[in-house]
Amino acid sequence: MNENKPSSSDEAWTSHRLQMVENQIVRRQVKDPAVIEAMRKVPRHLFVPPEYQDSSYHDGPLPIGYEQTISQPYVVASMTEELKLQPENRVLEIGTGCGYQTAVLAEITCEVFTIEIIPQLAQKAQKLLGKLGYKNIHFRHGDGSTGWPEKAPFDAIIVTAAAPVIPPAFIQQLKYGGRMVIPVERGMFGSQDLILIIKDYDRVKETSLYPVRFVPLITRDED
Ligand code: SAH
């Protein structure tokens, strides 16, 4: 399929997408107009493997290969909303994956810095996001668990893989007043909570938002 060529099926995808935003995002109380607009715009069906395209606007995560997943649309919207992004913000994303969340961030803010550890996913996402015309995304292939110190500090950080503890580098690279969302492994049975971090001058405030299920953050000493 040539995604640059308008066709009647583009209209069908758009209609699925707008329905998805109404039923899964707006109905569940996501309110930030910039997030809603971005979710209406980014063509999620182009980010999933062809065999899952028909399910791309369903209310759930999907496999993207290499044992990784694209998150459920609601989780993408809700995590993005928690960052309270402004157009002039610079955002760090750990775990580019298929690049869908990256595109949503790039619709809202002026600069997105994204790191992916699996080379095939990194290349594929970079190619697709380039083809879709995004010029405000900076890509890095490697271990993102130490952040991107050369480009810090960031207004916001979003981590899309779960860690047993919050890597200290992420907090260091967050601006004062900055916000971070990260899935953190809690206790037994692989349960995870989405944690919101707000870095103030005098303290780092941590709030548990809701239970989530993300793939683990991979750490590779050699990277
Ligand atoms: N936001 C992505 C989610 C992908 S799943 C999407 O919507 O597609 C999490 C991603 O984090 C995977 O692609 C995985 O390879 C990547 N990842 C895991 N550990 C990482 C690390 N240490 N550094 C960078 N990326 C990592």
Image (cartoon, rainbow, N blue to C red):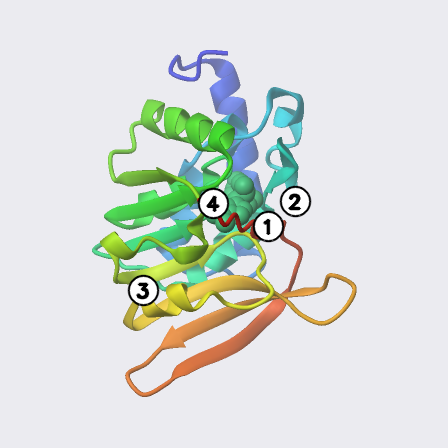
Which three-letter amino acid code belongs to the residue tagged 4? Glu
Residue, x 30% and y 39% (percent of image)? 137
Mark earlier in primary sequence (2, 3):
2
Closer to viewer: mark 1 or mark 4:
4
Q: Which residue is mark 4?
A: 222
Which three-letter amino acid code belongs to the residue tagged 1? Gln
Helix or strand or loop: what does disc 3 sit on? Answer: loop
Residue at disc 4, CB closer than 8 Å to ligand 1: no
Would you call the spot at circle 2 few (<14 residues within 10 Å), some (14-19), or many (20 or more)? some
CB contact under 8 Å: marks 2 and 4: no
Q: Is residue 20 left or right of residue 82?
A: right
CB contact under 8 Å: marks 3 and 4: no
194 shown above or below 80: below
Q: Residue furthest left?
A: 88
Q: CA distance from mark 2 to mark 4?
A: 37 Å
- Using the image as rendered, state which of residue 64 and residue 67 is in the foreground: 67
Mark earlier in primary sequence (2, 1):
1
Closer to viewer: mark 3 or mark 1:
3
Q: Which residue is mark 1?
A: 24
Residue at disc 3, CB closer than 8 Å to ligand 1: no
Q: Which residue is mark 3?
A: 173
Helix or strand or loop: what does disc 1 sit on? Answer: helix
Would you call the spot at circle 1 few (<14 residues within 10 Å), some (14-19), or many (20 or more)? many
Asked if one can make out residue 156 in the rendered structure from this viewpoint, the answer is yes
Closer to viewer: mark 2 or mark 1:
2
- Using the image as rendered, state which of residue 106 and residue 26 is in the foreground: 106
Q: Which residue is mark 2?
A: 59
Residue, x 58% and y 57% (percent of image)? 162
